[in-house]
Image (cartoon, grey):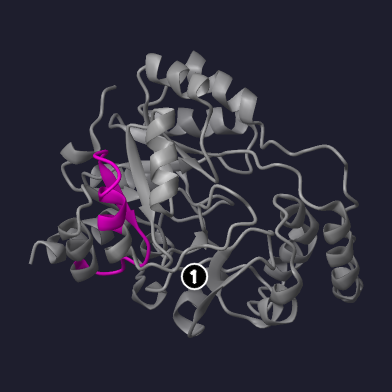
Amino acid sequence: MAVRLDELAVPVIAAPMAGGASTPELVAAVNRAGGLGFLAAGYRSAPAMAEQIALVRKSSDRPYGVNLFVPSPPGDRAAVAAYRERLQPEAERWGVTLPEESGQPDRDDWEAKLAVLLADPVPVVSYTFGLPTAEEASALRAAGTLQVGTVTTPEEARAAQAVGMDALCVQGPEAGGHRGTHRVADVPGEVPLLRLLPAVREVTGLPLVAAGGLGDGAAVAAALRAGAVAVQLGTALLRSDESGASAAHRAALTELPETTVTRAFTGRPARGLRNAFIDRHGPYAPPAYPEVHHLTAPLRAAATRREDTEAMHLWAGTAHHLARSGPAEAIVTDLWRSAQG
């Protein structure tokens, strides 16, 4: 089970994309290319995570990873309630009901997922939105699992090393989807990935994985030269045959011109294709996650059903226009060949 990120046959890791884009088929395809496939356990129950792990094991005998969302402290209930009032007319327009706050913190089945991963270990586990406790990290290390902390600043890198991470995923501001800031209210940094990598290298000797806006061979090569042992690709794989992204999302990657970072859909800063929903509501969304995620879920589901790209959450990195269709194995192989010059 032992795996080293600096010894991958092809130094490409599939970004874990929660919400359905990452699939067991995508994991297997990236593995076939010589890279490291990743499952996204965020928003899934522990049993659902275990089911996906079982599917990966049936389709691939190579190492793979599982990504966990670290629970966040409760958000400001009054601010969430105010945002609900703002969204109410939109909900009425589309005939959906916005959920009332439950009052119970959503920990994304954290404890149950850790129990599954300790009872039946996987090769690699990565963390987004924070870090496990030192005790949790120690338990997984004893189980033989390599652990990767997602960081967006040198300060977060220090914390990840202190808690016992084996490697770091350095996420630049160019990345699509949620920024991996360790605190919900933090304003994400804007230091470009190619400058962030050496800044993180100054504070840690851990292996670094580069993530954010890596859409072609030249960008992959530049990230490796900047000190990464591997690159993590998300948006570049969204249009692949094995991706679980919707047809509307796939099309929007080539049709909508720009991305922006917003809290409008989930309460956490995330980069997506700019649309009318973001323009209307982004400035008013509170830093409350996952409360805002649950609040907007019915609106997002309704927008997806009607394929309304002006109201959907369409996560995408800055190189989204380079994403191409076809088998993921071929996409990874071609990108790596291009990176080698």
In the rendered image, residue 175 lying in the magenta stretch gets the answer no
Q: Position of residue 214 (x, y in %)?
A: 31, 65
In the picture, residue 266 is in which quadrant? bottom right
| Foreground residue among 202 and 320 | 202
Q: Residue 197 at x, y = what percent?
A: 28, 56
- Residue sitting nearer the eye, 48 or 201: 201
Query: Looking at the figure, which quarter contains the C terminus?
Result: bottom left
Judging depth in this view, the residue of 3 and 245 nearest the camera is 3
Which quadrant is home to the N terminus? top left
Residue depicted at 44% across the width and 69% down the height: 190
Q: Is residue 247 visible?
A: no
- Secondary structure state at the residue bearing disc 1: helix
* Residue 287 visible in the picture: yes
Q: Which residue is mark 1?
A: 250
- The magenta-colored residue range is 197-217
Give amino acid for label 1: Arg
Q: Is residue 185 above or below residue 150?
A: below
